[in-house]
Image (cartoon, helix red, strand yellow):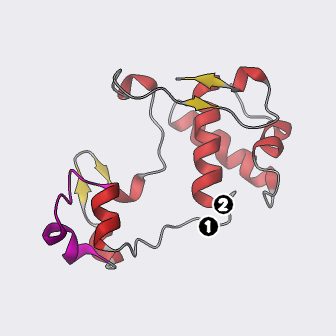
Amino acid sequence: MELLAKQLATAMPTLRAPRVWLSVLNEAMERFEIASSAHIAAFLVQVARDSKECRYLEDDLRYPAEALMRMWPQHFPTLATAHPYARNPEKLANVSTGARSVTRRFCAAPSSAYPSAMPQMTFCVSGMPSSFCTTA
């Protein structure tokens, strides 16, 4: 399923250069096999929220130790393990948490990658067709 300009405008009403982003987002969805309405909606919501509608394209990674513990508790279980990486973007960017780097938080994966015990979430973008509103 390809994202249409009208759908993108509804999901990100203040997006600058929507035609450019439409192409980029469609390419990313194809590459990462984001094809169902549920995954497209979740992907758009995540991109819009995390990037302020594509205004911020990089995460500066200057997190305090407490934030590192909240975001990646399996890698930074204590202040002692988190402190060397706190507010140190270069060092943090080189950390790997299993198969994914901490800098790849925005990638989406097929639903089979998520455990069935995951809490129920509803994904919907206001004004989107009901086919884009789903519970996963």
Q: Residue at x 35, y 56 (%)?
A: 71
**Is 74 part of what is drawn in magenta?**
yes
- Contact check, label 1 and label 2, Cβ < 8 Å: yes
**As rendered, which of 101 and 13 lies closer to the eye?**
13
* Cα distance between the residues tagged 1 and 2: 6 Å
The residue range painted magenta reads 72-86
Q: Residue furthest right?
A: 6
Give the amino acid type for the residue marked by disc 1 in the picture.
Tyr
Is 63 placed above or below 17 here? Answer: below
How many residues crowd mark 1 within 10 Å: few (<14), some (14–19), many (20+)? Answer: few
Q: Residue at x 26, y 45 (%)?
A: 99
128 sits to left or right of 89: right
Q: Residue at x 68, y 65 (%)?
A: 55
From the image, state whether disc 1 or disc 2 is nearer to you.
2
Does residue 36 appear anywhere in the picture? no
Q: Which mark is residue 56?
A: 1
86 sits to left or right of 32: left
Is 98 placed above or below 85 here? Answer: above
Image coordinates of residue 56 in percent, x first then y, are 61, 67
Image coordinates of residue 118 in percent, x first then y, are 38, 28
The residue at which mark 2 appears reads as 52
Image quadrant where residue 127 sits: top right
Image coordinates of residue 100 in percent, x first then y, are 31, 48
Does residue 80 appear anywhere in the picture? yes
Label 2's element?
loop
27 sits to left or right of 14: left
Give the amino acid type for the residue marked by disc 2 in the picture.
Lys
32 sits to left or right of 5: left
Label 1's element?
loop
In the picture, which quadrant includes the N terminus? top right
Q: Which mark is residue 108?
A: none
